Amino acid sequence: MEEQNFFDNVYEVAKQIPYGRVTSYGAIAKYLGAARSARMVGWAMNNSSGKDVPAHRVVNRIGVLTGKHHFDGTNLMQQLLENEGIEVVDNQIVSFKEHFWDPAKELG
């Protein structure tokens, strides 16, 4: 799969993550049939600026804000999540499983 097409597919999935919910890089990769490409999903999120993608809703598999250094300002990713009612402590989402949105289940 061509990298740009993969990134576009990642963005289409990420745009469907509901307000107040999060998913993981791996869950998006698995949904797209590329289960071992979580890192590529991360690269796509890193390149999503200006594409109206809620990249702040994509975290690692245990709910850690591993992409936060790609956001302007030190705590922008956390602030965006907290604005949606998601509690974050020490760069990790509290009650991660309750907030988790699985594209494989939600999008079929």
Image (tube, rainbow, N blue to C red):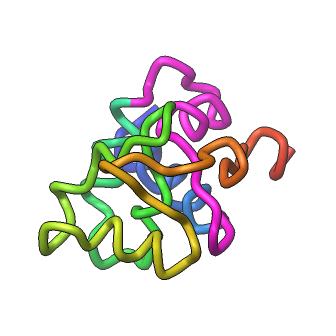
> Foreground residue, 78 or 53?
78
Q: In which quarter of the image is the C terminus?
A: top right
Q: Tell me which residue sits at (58%, 55%) in the image.
A: 22
Task: Please provide percent x and percent y for residue 10.
Answer: 51, 50
Asked if 70 appears above or below 43 in the picture, the reply is: below
* Left-right relation of 99 to 66: right
Task: Please provide percent x and percent y for residue 37.
Answer: 44, 25
Asked if 29 appears above or below 12 in the picture, the reply is: above
Whether 17 is among the magenta residues is yes
Q: Tell me which residue sits at (60%, 35%) in the image.
A: 27
Task: Please provide percent x and percent y for residue 1.
Answer: 47, 32
> Foreground residue, 58 or 92?
92
Q: Tell me which residue sits at (48%, 18%) in the image.
A: 36
Q: Tell me which residue sits at (52%, 31%) in the image.
A: 26
> Foreground residue, 18 or 62?
62
Tell me the magenta residue range.
16-38
Quarter location, residue 73 = bottom left
Whether 32 is among the magenta residues is yes
